[in-house]
């Protein structure tokens, strides 16, 4: 078994343990392997270890990687920032986009999604803790944007995504993730059919799962330290 496969097994064990502590079904928490800066061979090794869904931040790197992996059935998630001049790459190549925070970007993604592909699955990125340098729609504006995005024909709004500032301990991380869960439930109560809370990474996946995360995005604990930045 490769190191990556061993690491995947360890991360899955953490998810199972966190779910047990939170009284949740581990089958309801999806693992997204964040493969940015790692090449196709690392993705192949993770796939051999049972991983099918991968998150990428850097769009051109991701598209090149996809081209080298067309023989492997994978699901690709865009978890990096989406600029207006890069929406076509996301619309044409990815299955999911987690980082919507502007209606303009959502409209371009919908308009540019090829007709032969299934609608793009999307999450709104919410700046849940008010970080000054963080992307994301402010929580108070999330409902209005969600309603607009839900009406676009080639997108399916699935839920919320957050990247809060690092927390010093479990209780601090839990409080922030619980804010996202509360906002998620508020949007559901307003009639939006949401099922995805994309929150939690290597350092805080336990707190995120305790708060209700349905998808944790883990890179370092699977692939190791980042090799480079494009």
Image: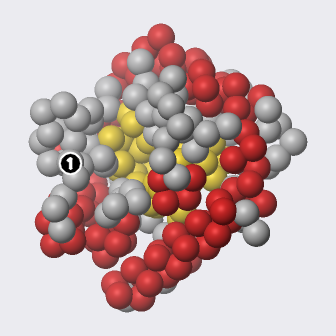
Judge whether 29 appears above or below 216 on screen.
Answer: below
- Which part of the image, by quadrant, shows the N terminus? bottom right
Estimate the x, y position of residue 37 in percent, counting from the top left: 56, 35
Judge whether 21 appears above or below 177 on screen.
Answer: below
Q: Residue at x 33, y 41 (%)?
A: 125
Q: How many marks?
A: 1
Q: Is residue 207 visible?
A: yes
Q: Residue at x 53, y 37 (%)?
A: 227
Instruction: Please tell me whether mark 1 sits on a helix, a strand or a loop.
Output: loop
Estimate the x, y position of residue 30 in percent, counting from the top left: 53, 65
Q: Residue furthest right?
A: 71
Q: Is residue 119 visible?
A: no
Q: Quadrant of residue 7?
A: bottom right
Estimate the x, y position of residue 216 in percent, counting from the top left: 44, 60
Nearer to us in this view, 46 or 117: 46
Judge whether 71 appears above or below 80 on screen.
Answer: below
Estimate the x, y position of residue 115 in percent, counting from the top left: 71, 27
Residue holding disc 1: 165
Image-based side of 43 in relation to 177, left or right: right
Q: Residue at x 35, y 87 (%)?
A: 21
Q: In the rendered view, how is the structure colored?
A: secondary structure
Q: Residue at x 41, y 18 (%)?
A: 83
Q: Residues within 10 Å of mark 1 (few under 14, many from 20)?
A: some
């Amino acid at each position: 078994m490769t190191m990556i496969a061993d690491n995947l097994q360890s991360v899955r064990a953490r998810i199972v343990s966190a779910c047990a502590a939170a009284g949740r079904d581990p089958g309801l928490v999806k693992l997204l392997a964040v493969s940015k800066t790692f090449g196709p061979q690392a993705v192949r090794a993770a796939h051999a270890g049972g991983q099918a869904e991968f998150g990428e931040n850097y769009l051109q790197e991701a598209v090149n990687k996809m081209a080298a992996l067309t023989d492997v059935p994978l699901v690709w998630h865009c978890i990096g920032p989406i600029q207006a001049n890069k929406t076509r790459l996301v619309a044409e190549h990815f299955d999911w986009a987690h980082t919507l925070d502007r209606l303009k970007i959502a409209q371009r993604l919908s308009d540019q999604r090829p007709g032969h592909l299934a609608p793009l699955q999307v999450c709104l990125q919410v700046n849940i803790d008010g970080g000054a340098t963080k992307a994301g729609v402010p929580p108070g504006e999330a409902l209005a944007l969600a309603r607009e995005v839900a009406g676009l024909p080639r997108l399916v709004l699935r839920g919320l995504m957050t990247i809060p500032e690092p927390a010093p301990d479990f209780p601090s991380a839990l409080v922030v993730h619980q804010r996202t869960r509360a906002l998620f439930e508020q949007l559901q109560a307003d009639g939006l059919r949401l099922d995805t809370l994309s929150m939690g990474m290597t350092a805080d996946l336990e707190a995120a799962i305790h708060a209700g995360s349905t998808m944790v995005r883990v890179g370092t604990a699977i692939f190791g330290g980042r090799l480079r930045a494009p």
